[in-house]
Amino acid sequence: MDDTAAGGSARREGIVRAATGAFLRFGFRKTSMEDVAKAAAISRQGLYLHFETKEALFRAVVEQMLADLRSTTWEALDREDVEAGERLARALEAFHGVTVGTVNREVYSELLSSARSFALDRMSRMEEEFVAGMAALLTSTGHAAAWEGAGLSAAELAQNLFDASAGAKHESGSLDDYRRRVRVATRIITSRPRD
């Protein structure tokens, strides 16, 4: 790759990062290309050289957010130097907690709604893969076996954790509150049930 291509790629990445902040602050509908240009310290004309429309820019933002989400979630889940409950809590926070207390709920809902038209299948697959990854962790660490007597599978335990985390995301007023709620849920699942 030549220096020009590398510079263009870095510039494009900087624009996407700046646009992410603008979209998270204002939402898709209220964010203008002028807002993004200012945030990226680039002229509007320069911005249009990289992205022909706001929709194309938003797609790039969503793609980058999903890639970042997947990377940080799996990094937390795969850490073998941390006990299972903490790995689960960190992975759930990476997946759901990233915007808690920092992004207006209405703005976030509007962004999700706008992204569903082109990213719903990918978002659904990521959720399914994450729940399967949590189930595999619960199985490999023996936590799922402890719940077999209660008639619960690893997949059911993992889905319950995912749902609890999603609910905590919407009900928590702060990241600390979210973390507390998720850690209670993971402690319940990773503790042995009484017979």
Image (cartoon, rainbow, N blue to C red):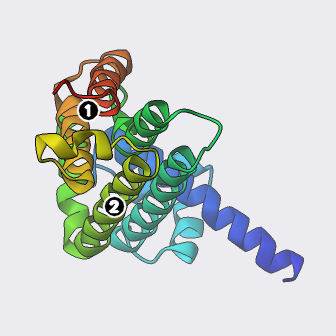
Return the x and y of residue 31 as percentages of the image width and height: 33, 51
Return the x and y of residue 141 as percentages of the image width and height: 46, 45
Residue receiving disc 1: 104
Tell me, yes or no, whether the two marked residues, 2 and 1, touch with CB atoms within 8 Å: no
Is 187 drawn above or below residue 133 in the view shown? above
Secondary element type, mark 1 = loop
Residue receiving disc 2: 132
Return the x and y of residue 180 as percentages of the image width and height: 33, 17
Q: Does the image show residue 29?
A: no
User: Please, which residue is most extreme toward the left here?
Assistant: 151
Quadrant position of the N terminus in the picture: bottom right
Q: Residue at x 47, y 35 (%)?
A: 90
Q: Residue at x 27, y 52 (%)?
A: 154
Return the x and y of residue 37 as percentages of the image width and height: 52, 54
Instruction: Tell me the quarter of the picture where residue 62 sits.
Output: bottom left
Q: Amino acid at mark 2?
A: Ala
Label 2 – label 1 distance at C-alpha: 30 Å
Q: What number is the disc on residue 10?
A: none
Q: In the image shown, does 46 or 149 lie closer to the viewer?
A: 149
Is 60 drawn above or below residue 166 in the view shown? below
